[in-house]
Image (spheres, coloured by chain):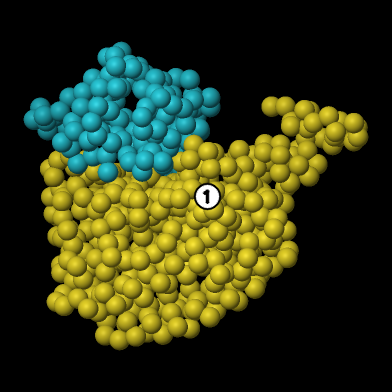
Chain colours: A yellow, B cyan
């Protein structure tokens, strides 16, 4: 393929051409967020072509799903996006429940919102901290993990696991919360709220961070939609879409009665923008900085939702109910459901044939679609911008390779 | 929310591309329309560019292998053996979804090993590129007109398509025993 420099007359005039070089970034490169390999064709400092190679973490999850009952596949969904395993459990559970036309109890619904939103905060904290690492600043990572640790402690108390929970399951949740959990969760929120200012000081308004991210990797809204991007990547490009509000009835019913504003820039303003630092003048909509900032807003938004869920959950009488049997038969037919996961819209497609084992289990990964845009986004950027762009997409390889 | 419930949408599609829609089930959980495999790219192009509801985003392509390897069980099944491709589309402005299905023979000309073909939709949505590569890799469907159709998750020299129901895992791969 011809280099982009061939077409740029200004550079040819200089007559200083370096040889094209192929540079392998990954699969063991720390800033590729897992085992992602990028082959860069570089001309000096400029990247003329990027080719992502994936599949290093392929574990045949869909094939396994065809050999297990619907509930037995839950632990495998944990290992897709292992940074937001609660949200993965929820997506598959809801898709199967949609096919079975099953509705969980009111108390279980609020508990699911509570847990899913805490999972979103934990995932965004890793996304934010690791993004700092990508750009060469180490401290935000430690700050983010300090708070994430407390969320993991809460999850551990609720279900026994720190990373792969299998807590939300088909037909409800595996257990109710232990006594005193809600108070500890509230104590965490009270401690977490003022800390967010520190993150903004460390990253959002940091001059070096802004230089590295503002006006870098700009993705137009048409491009984002065309590639099927979703989540903060899509909203960072100014598309007003959040499945918690715009999704299918079975999913939006979960958030029925909850108040939240979609984190997207409308008429040049983010919702409740007086609470956040101002948008730097260099930043343009759709760049790395905006994708990062949308996540920071969603952390606050999720915190709000957790507080609302705590109130509603404690107002509910009775129990959360029992999950379905492991060998529960699922009806013939198919159902597809997308949910708003921290990384984007995660879709699960289940085809039943009347037995307990699904005929086909499919996972549509949001990171997969979000990553497919890299080749277009990185064309013509500097080598140092490649980690900045890939990091801003906040991908998880476990979910891409499945 | 599904658009096929709206009035007149399917009539407009029928009028614009007569014969392309070969079946429908509007009572299903996710109402779907069945499209003739050879015309999938045309239909998708119409849905993105000319339809009253613009489906500007392709969410997912899934291949479902309807095949029962056990001959005793196969005699009892109620469905026709086939590869079914399922396209999940989404309209960002209207916030509605649409499901397209395409039935393909399991092997082209009934020759085991020769992959069934249908037109690629990469010209309609750029995001279809990787999705079609994944379907080719795991389910063995050849998309004609795809710019760069090669395996994406499995190694390039992998044999067979794992999500086929009659897939047999290789005994070894480059000296690594699998079983």
Q: Position of residue A69 (x, y in %)?
A: 21, 51
Q: Quadrant of residue A364?
A: top left
Residue drawn 30% across the image and 22% down it: B13
Q: Quadrant of residue B120?
A: top left
Q: Position of residue B31 (x, y in %)?
A: 22, 36
Chain bearing tag 1 is: A
Residue drawn 13% across the image and 45% down it: A331
Residue drawn 56% across the image and 70% down it: A274
Q: Residues within 10 Å of mark 1 (few under 14, many from 20)?
A: many
Q: Position of residue B98 (x, y in %)?
A: 31, 35
Residue closer to the observer: B163 or A235: A235
Figure check: A223 above or below A304: above
* A138 on left or right of B49: right
Residue drawn 40% across the image and 56% down it: A341
Residue closer to the observer: A34 or A309: A309
Residue closer to the observer: A37 or A113: A113
Residue B37 visible in the current orientation? yes
Which residue was labeled with disc 1?
A238
Residue B155 visible in the current orientation? no
């Amino acid at each position: 393929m011809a280099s982009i420099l061939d077409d740029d007359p200004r550079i040819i005039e200089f007559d200083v051409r370096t040889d094209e070089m192929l540079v392998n970034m990954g699969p063991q490169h720390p800033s590729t967020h897992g085992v992602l390999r990028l082959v860069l064709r570089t001309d000096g400092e400029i990247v003329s072509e990027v080719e992502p190679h994936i599949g290093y973490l392929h574990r045949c999850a869909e094939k396994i799903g065809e050999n297990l009952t619907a509930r037995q596949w839950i632990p495998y969904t944990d290992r897709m996006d292992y940074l937001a395993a609660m949200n993965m459990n929820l997506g598959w559970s809801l898709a199967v429940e949609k096919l079975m036309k099953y509705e969980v109890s009111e108390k279980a619904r609020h508990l699911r919102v509570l847990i899913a939103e805490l999972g979103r905060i934990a995932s965004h904290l890793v996304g934010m901290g690791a993004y700092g690492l990508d750009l060469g600043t180490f401290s935000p990572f430690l700050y983010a993990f300090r708070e994430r640790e407390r969320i993991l402690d809460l999850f551990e108390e609720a279900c026994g696991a720190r990373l792969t929970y299998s807590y939300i399951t088909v037909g409800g949740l595996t257990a109710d919360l232990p006594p005193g959990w809600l108070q500890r969760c509230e104590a965490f929120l009270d401690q977490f709220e003022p800390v967010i200012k520190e993150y903004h000081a460390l990253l959002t308004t940091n001059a070096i961070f802004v230089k590295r991210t503002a006006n870098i990797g700009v993705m137009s809204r048409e491009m984002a939609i065309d590639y099927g991007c979703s989540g903060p990547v899509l909203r960072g490009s100014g598309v007003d879409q959040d499945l918690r509000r715009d999704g299918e009835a079975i999913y939006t019913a979960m958030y029925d009665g909850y108040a939240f504003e979609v984190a997207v820039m409308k008429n040049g303003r983010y919702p409740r923008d007086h609470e956040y630092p101002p948008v730097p003048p260099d930043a343009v909509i759709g760049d790395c900085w905006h994708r990062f900032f949308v996540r920071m807003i969603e952390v606050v938004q999720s915190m709000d939702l957790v507080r609302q869920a705590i109130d509603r959950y404690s107002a509910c009488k009775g129990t959360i109910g029992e999950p379905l049997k492991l060998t529960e038969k699922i009806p013939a037919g198919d159902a597809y459901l997308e949910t708003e996961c921290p990384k984007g819209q995660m879709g699960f497609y289940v085809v039943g044939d009347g037995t307990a084992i699904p005929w086909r289990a499919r996972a549509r990964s949001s990171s997969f679609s979000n990553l497919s845009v890299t080749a277009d986004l990185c064309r013509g950027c500097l080598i140092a911008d490649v980690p900045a762009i890939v990091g801003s997409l906040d991908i998880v390889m476990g979910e891409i390779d499945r | 929310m599904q658009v096929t419930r709206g009035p007149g949408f399917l009539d407009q599609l029928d009028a614009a591309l007569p014969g392309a829609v070969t079946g429908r089930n509007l009572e299903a959980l996710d109402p779907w329309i069945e499209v003739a495999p050879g015309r999938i790219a045309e239909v998708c192009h119409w849905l993105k560019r000319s339809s009253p509801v613009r489906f500007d985003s392709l969410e997912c392509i899934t291949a479902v292998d309807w095949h029962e390897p056990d001959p005793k069980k196969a005699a009892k099944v109620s469905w026709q053996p086939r590869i079914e491709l399922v396209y999940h589309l989404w309209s960002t402005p209207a916030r509605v979804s649409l499901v397209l299905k395409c039935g393909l023979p399991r092997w082209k000309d009934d020759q085991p090993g020769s992959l069934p073909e249908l037109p690629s939709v990469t010209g309609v949505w750029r995001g279809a590129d990787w999705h079609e590569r994944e379907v080719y890799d795991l389910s063995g469907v050849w998309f004609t007109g795809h710019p760069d159709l090669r395996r994406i998750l499995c190694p390039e020299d992998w044999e067979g398509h794992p999500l086929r129901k009659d897939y047999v895992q290789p005994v070894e791969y480059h000296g690594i025993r699998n079983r």
